[in-house]
Structure formats: C-alpha cells, structure tokens
C-alpha cells in the first residue's frame, strides 16, 4: 500500500509541476490532474495485466512480496517509471492540442 501511495503522489506531482511550470489557469490545473490520473490508472491497469502474465512463469513459492526475490525491487522501480510515463503521455497529448 505504501508503494501505491508513493505512485499516486508521483502521478499528481507530474500534473501539478506541468501546470505550474506552464502557468496554467484553474481549468488547466484541473485538466492536468484529470489527464494525469487517467493516464496513471491506465498504466496501472496495463502493468497489472503484464504482472498477471509474468508471475506464473517465475515459479515462486507464495507471493512476490513475501519471497524477497530480487525481481520485486526491479519491478517496483519499473512500475514507478511506467506510472510517470503513463501520467506524462496524456499531458503531452493535451499540450499538443492546446497550441
């Protein structure tokens, strides 16, 4: 749960930073937060599908979290990067339409 809280904070930070750095108004801030949340949730869904496909091939005894497998730490870093990309891509798309 702590990891997911950190990922949500990172996702919102991407939206807030982009809105603040480009001097958006209130509607722009709301649009950025909604787009970033949408992209982050889509990224989480795709990551979940990927994990469902990957875990049976690892032959772990129990869950990945309880196994202390080194892949656990690699996946946490990969999920963080993919969530930032998932949050950034809709913002990039919105910026293309704003100009």
Image (cartoon, grey):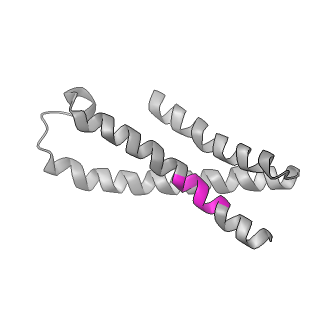
Placement of the N terminus among the 4 image quadrants:
top left
Left or right: 41 in relation to 72: right
Task: Examine the residues drawn in magenta and state their main secondary structure.
Answer: helix
Give the x, y percent position of residue 27.
85, 55
Question: What segment is highlighted magenta in the picture?
Answer: 85-91
Give the x, y percent position of residue 47.
39, 52
Q: In this orientation, which residue lies closer to the viewer: 41 or 15?
A: 15
Give the x, y percent position of residue 48.
37, 51
Q: Residue furthest front?
A: 21
Give the x, y percent position of residue 82.
46, 51
Placement of the C terminus among the 4 image quadrants:
bottom right
The residue at the point 11 percent across, 43 percent down is 59
Observer able to see residue 33: yes
The residue at the point 40 percent across, 40 percent down is 77
Total count of labels: 0
The residue at the point 28 percent across, 52 percent down is 52
Q: In this orientation, which residue lies closer to the viewer: 58 or 13?
A: 13
Q: Residue furthest right?
A: 25
- 26 shown above or below 6: below
Observer able to see residue 1: no
The residue at the point 47 percent across, 27 percent down is 2
Is 90 within the magenta?
yes
């Amino acid at each position: 749960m702590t990891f997911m809280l950190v990922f949500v904070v990172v996702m919102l930070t991407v939206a807030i930073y982009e809105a603040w750095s480009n001097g958006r108004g209130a509607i722009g801030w709301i649009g950025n937060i909604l787009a970033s949340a949408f992209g982050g949730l889509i990224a989480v869904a795709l990551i979940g599908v990927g994990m469902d496909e990957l875990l049976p091939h690892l032959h772990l005894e129990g869950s990945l979290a309880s196994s202390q497998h080194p892949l656990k730490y690699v996946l946490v870093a990969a999920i963080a990067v993919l969530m930032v990309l998932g949050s950034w891509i809709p913002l990039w798309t919105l910026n293309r339409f704003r100009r």
